[in-house]
Image: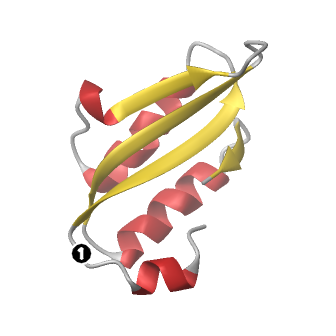
Amino acid sequence: MANETDLEILEFPCRFPVKAMGQNQPAFEQLVVEAVRIHAGAISPGDVVTRPSRNGRYLSVTVTFTATSRDQLDAIYRTLSSSEHVLFLL
């Protein structure tokens, strides 16, 4: 989850990136985007950046969205961290 000190200095609404890492599988990007969309609404393709690891085994997906509250951010982090497909979350 995001650091409490970091969240205290955020002024909502604000643009906020969430990065999740998992196995490089076709459905991983969609899983991350859908988890954010549930809590943040529509996500445009320009809000999503994916990068494979050097050896191609892992994939990082960063979704930048307009965060409206700490509760919203907490809900997104809970949803993503509860997925067995998410190995690391920033």
Q: Is residue 55 left or right of residue 75?
A: right
Q: Is residue 24 left or right of residue 77?
A: right
Residue 34 in picture, x, y percent from top left: 41, 37
| Residue 85 figure quarter | top right
Say what amino acid the circle numbered 1 marks.
Phe
Q: Is residue 72 above or below residue 23?
A: below
The residue that disc 1 covers is 12
Residue 73 in picture, x, y percent from top left: 42, 66
Q: Is residue 41 left or right of residue 63?
A: left
Residue 52 in picture, x, y percent from top left: 63, 19
At mark 1, the secondary structure is: loop
* Residue at x-position 47% and y-position 58%: 76
Q: Residues within 10 Å of mark 1 (few under 14, many from 20)?
A: few
Q: Is residue 19 above or below residue 60?
A: below
Q: Is residue 61 left or right of residue 9?
A: right
Q: Nearer the viewer, residue 90 or 43?
A: 90
* Residue at x-position 26% and y-position 28%: 46
Q: Is residue 18 above or below residue 45?
A: below
Q: Quadrant of the C terminus?
A: bottom right
Q: Nearer the viewer, residue 76 or 58?
A: 58
